[in-house]
Amino acid sequence: MMPLRIHTEGQVLMKSNNTVPKRVIIFFVVLILLLLGSWLWWIDGTSPVAPLDPKPIMFVVRQGDGVRTIAANLANQNLIRSSTAFFVLVKIMGLEKSLQAGDFRLNRALGADEIASELTHGYLDVWVTTLEGWRNEEIANQLAKDLDIPEGEFLKVAQEGYMFPDTYLIPRDASAAAIANIFRSTFDQKITEQMKVDAQKQGLTVEEVIILASIVEREGRTSEDRPVIAGILLKRLNADWPLQADATLQYALGYQATEKSWWKKSLTTEDKKIRSAFNTYLNPGLPPRPISSPGLASLKAVIYPQESAFWFYLHDNDGNVHYAATIEEHNENIARYLQ
C-alpha cells in the first residue's frame, strides 16, 4: 500500500507544478489587449483622414512653429486624425529638425507619414525675415541663404532705405526684382498720406525722412531714444551743423573682414577723416541717400520728433545713450563714459 501512495502523490505533485497561475494568464491577456489597442490606435491615428479626397489644402508653417504646434494646426484643419500620433511619428522618423517653415499644398488623402515628409521639402513659399537697420548687402545675404538668390542680382534692383524690414512669405521661385518690389510695396503701404503731410509741415521730403530715419535706426536703439535722437539731428540739420553720426561713417567704411560685419564697431580719429559723401563729420547736411532700412518706429520718430534741450549724444560701451545740452557737458560725458 505504501509504494502506491507515494506514486499517487508524485502524480498529484506533477500536476500541481504544471498549472499556470490565473494572474499570469490575466497579465498576458491584458498585455495583448493593450498592444492590440495601441496598434489599432496607431493605425487609425496615422491613416489618411479621407483616402478619396485629393483636393489640395494650403497649410502654413510659420517660422518658429514647433512639432506640437504644427501637429495641432494639422488636426485643426482636419489634415490628420491625431495630433499625438503625428507628434510621435515625427519623433520616430527623426524629422523634428527637418520640418520647414513655409506654405504647403497638402490633402486629406495623405497619411501622417506622407504629410510629415511633405513638410520637409517642396514648400511653395518661404518665410524670410529682414531686420531694421540692415543695409542692402545684409538683406541680400539673407535672401541668398533662404532663397538662393544671388546677392548681386538683388543689389542691382534694391533701393537702399525702401526695402521695408519685416517677415515675408515669399514664393520660392520669385526673382530678385519681384522680391524688391514686395519690399518696396510694403514700404509704400506703411508710409501713410497723413505721415507725408506731417513731414511736409517740418519742411521734409519723403526722401529726407527716409535718410534721417535710416540714421536714427542705427543710432537709436530703443523706442525712448529714437524720437530724442531724431530731434537732435533735425536741430543740427536746421542749424547747418554737421550731423556727426557714427552710423553714416560706418556705412562709408563698408564691410569689416576682421569683425565679419558691415558696421565697424569702434571708430578711430582717422576713420573720421575719410573722404566720402557719407562722412557726416566732414560734410554738413544729409548724406546722399539712406544708409539702412528703417522700421516704422524710426520713420515716425523723424516725422514726430521729441523736442529737448540736447544738442549732443553718445553711446557708452553698454549701448546706453547719454545726452548733453552743451559741448562742455558732452566732453564731460566723453571723459566719463568713453575713456
Image (cartoon, rainbow, N blue to C red):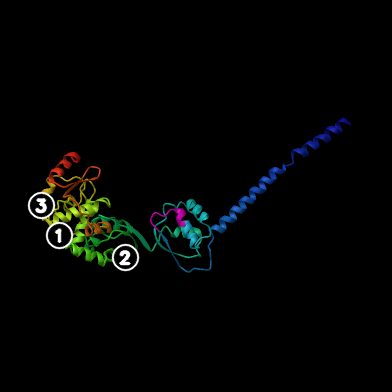
- How far separated are the C-alphas under marks 2 and 3? 42 Å
Label 3 is placed on what type of residue? Answer: Leu
Secondary structure beneath label 3: loop
Residue at the image position 52 percent from the left and 54 percent from the top: 84
**What element does badge 2 sit on?**
loop
Ranked by sequence position, the earlier of labels 1 and 2 is 2
Above-or-below relation of 189 to 26: below
Q: Which quadrant would the C terminus be assigned to in this image?
A: top left
Q: Amino acid at mark 2?
A: Ala
- Looking at the rendered structure, the secondary structure element under dot 1 is loop
Kind of residue indicated by mark 1 = Pro
Question: Could you classify mark 2 by the number of other residues whose Cα lies within 10 Å: few (under 14), some (14-19), or many (20 or more)?
Answer: few
Q: Which residue is mark 1?
A: 288
Region of the chain picked out in magenta, as a range: 62-70
Q: Where in the figure is residue 75, as x and y percent of width and height? A: 50, 60
Quarter of the image holding residue 291? Answer: bottom left
Residue 203 placement, left or right of 66: left
Direction from residue 55 to residue 20 in the image, left or right: right
> Residue at (14%, 56%) from the top-left corner?
237
Q: Nearer the viewer, residue 176 or 225?
A: 225
Residue 45: x percent and y percent?
A: 55, 57
> Is the residue 112 above or below the residue 272 in the image?
below
- Image spot of residue 115 (x, y percent): 47, 60
Q: Nearer the viewer, residue 142 or 237?
A: 237
Residue under circle 3?
A: 282
- In-front residue for pair 212/175: 212
* Dot 2 and dot 3 residues touching (CB under 8 Å): no
Q: Residue 174 has which mark?
A: 2
Label 1 Cα neighbours within 10 Å, binned few <14 / some 14-19 / many ≥20: few
